[in-house]
């Protein structure tokens, strides 16, 4: 019987171990933590958005890095196949806004429990609190792994050690080193799906304020500026929220200025007409009390200060050019971004094992026979919405089938 060692007990590793064991391979899953799926507990704010109820094409459309590389993997295990597999194994699911799929119980731990029981039924041996120090190869072929508890001989290894983000969960970048020893090259890992940092004074006191239906635009080196429409959030260090997380996946050149458009549905002329109407109703009020219908109250004093207009000015005294400046500001609020949140807060690590060195039909290394990859360790990543968990599941599944 052939033996396969799976390194890492996250979603990729557990799925790889399950699919390899189903084929009759003896599988040993090695995880350095004292329990499986430590990161899964944090996903979806403890609820685990485990996939997205979409078809294969939509899944690939939501992969921002190397989408074509995942074509065979998502065809081997589509979001709907995954949902059926988990439900057959007792995990009840529900689909929420944006087709995000969660366990019905709202408990991320139920995902890990289901995967653990699937592995147990398939006969996977699990070794917890065991750290893989090296992959052992001879003449271009995998022979075993060296752990802190001794050597395990095997015919194949699936490396599912994750990226570098949230290192406290165990994914601290050692996977890159294990593959690098055998010639695999890396696309420089960097934090992605993370917040933007700004030291702008005017942001003080806004932490926790969320803005819906706004547009954030950022410059891109040598390319057209990038924009996202939706929800953003002010934090104590800058800005975050779904649209900022998505923008953080781009190749960025810090520092830069982001522009917030509070009224993306209105062009400048229409917004100006709207403000003129508001101002004619409030003509004897002071400017500082005139913006409440246009934006959240906590933002009004900030906008008043940014216009440079005296807050005590009566609305009827505001000149046409001051009003036009206000319109421009509401559609282009500048935020100076100095950097982004680091690996300790990034949802994923972009970069990782170079996909050119991995066969996308099998997940096997093109350099070392018997070495396979799955999950976030590979340079293929998606946006929020369950796409990263699904990428881990489907690459794990495909690797397991091929060991
Ligand atoms: C806060 C947060 C929330 C998230 N929410 C979502 C979400 O809702 N939906 C979604 O799709 N994605 C989400 N993600 C991303 C998702 O969790 C990851 O993309 C996914 O877990 C990657 O799976 P993986 O199996 O490749 O790696 P990981 O889950 O990182 O697992 C890797 C495992 O390998 C082990 N390991 C590493 N090195 C060794 C070694 N040398 N020896 C032994 N074991 C080792 C680690 O301890 C770890 O358990 C979130 C991420 C974070 C941080």
Image (cartoon, grey):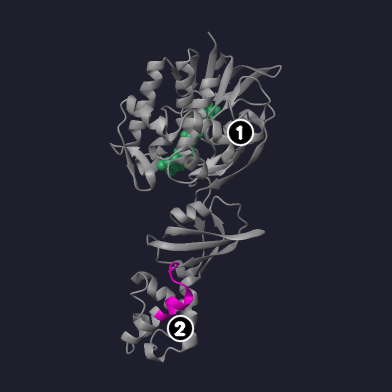
Of the residues tagged 2 and 1, which is closer to the observer? 2
Quarter residue 3 falls in: top right
In this rendering, is residue 28 above or below 293?
Answer: above
Q: Residues within 10 Å of mark 1 (few under 14, many from 20)?
A: many
Quarter residue 385 falls in: top left
Tag 1, which secondary structure?
helix
Q: Quadrant of the C terminus?
A: top right
Tag 2, which secondary structure?
helix
Where residue 50 appears, as percent x and y from the top left, is 40, 37
Per the image, the residue denoted by label 1 is 176
Per the image, the residue denoted by label 2 is 323
- The outermost residue toward the left is 105
Where residue 324 appears, as percent x and y from the top left, is 48, 82
Residues rendered magenta in the picture: 263-273
Cβ atoms under marks 2 and 1 closer than 8 Å: no
Q: Residues within 10 Å of mark 2 (few under 14, many from 20)?
A: some
Distance of mark 2 from mark 1, alpha carbons? 55 Å
């Amino acid at each position: 019987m052939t033996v396969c060692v799976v390194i890492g007990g996250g979603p990729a590793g557990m799925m790889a171990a399950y699919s390899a064991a189903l084929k009759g391979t003896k599988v040993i899953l090695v995880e350095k933590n004292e329990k499986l799926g430590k990161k899964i507990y944090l996903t979806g704010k403890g609820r685990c958005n485990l996939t997205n109820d979409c078809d294969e094409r939509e899944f690939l459309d939501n992969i921002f890095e190397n989408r074509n590389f995942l074509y065979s993997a998502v065809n081997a295990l589509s979001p709907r196949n995954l949902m059926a597999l988990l439900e057959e194994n007792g995990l009840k699911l529900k689909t929420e806004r944006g087709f995000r799929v969660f366990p019905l119980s709202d408990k991320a731990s139920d995902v890990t429990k289901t995967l653990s029981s699937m592995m147990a039924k398939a006969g996977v041996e699990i070794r917890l609190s065991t750290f893989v120090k090296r992959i052992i190869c001879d003449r271009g072929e995998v022979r075993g792994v060296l752990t802190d508890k001794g050597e395990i001989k095997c015919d194949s290894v699936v490396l599912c050690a994750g990226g570098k983000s949230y290192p406290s969960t165990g994914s601290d970048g050692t996977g890159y080193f294990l593959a690098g020893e055998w010639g695999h090259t890396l696309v420089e890992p960097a934090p992605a799906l993370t917040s933007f940092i700004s030291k702008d004074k005017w942001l003080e006191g806004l932490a926790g304020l969320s803005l819906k239906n706004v547009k954030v635009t950022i410059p891109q080196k040598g390319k057209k500026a990038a924009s996202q429409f939706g929800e953003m959030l002010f934090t104590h260090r800058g800005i975050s929220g779904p649209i900022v997380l998505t923008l953080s996946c781009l190749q960025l050149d810090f520092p830069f200025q982001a522009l917030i458009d509070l009224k993306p549905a209105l062009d400048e002329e229409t917004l100006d007409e709207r403000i003129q109407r508001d101002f004619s109703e409030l003509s004897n009020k002071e400017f500082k009390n005139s913006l409440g219908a246009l934006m959240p109250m906590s933002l009004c004093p900030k906008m008043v200060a940014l216009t440079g207009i005296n807050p005590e000015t009566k609305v009827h005294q505001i000149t046409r050019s001051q009003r036009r400046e206000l319109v421009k500001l509401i559609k282009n609020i500048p935020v100076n971004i100095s950097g982004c949140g680091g690996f300790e807060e990034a949802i994923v690590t972009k970069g990782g094992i170079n996909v050119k060195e991995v066969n996308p039909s099998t997940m096997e290394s093109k350099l070392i026979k018997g070495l396979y990859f799955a999950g976030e360790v590979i340079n293929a990543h998606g946006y929020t919405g369950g796409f990263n968990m699904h990428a881990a599941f489907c690459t794990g599944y495909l690797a397991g089938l091929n060991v």
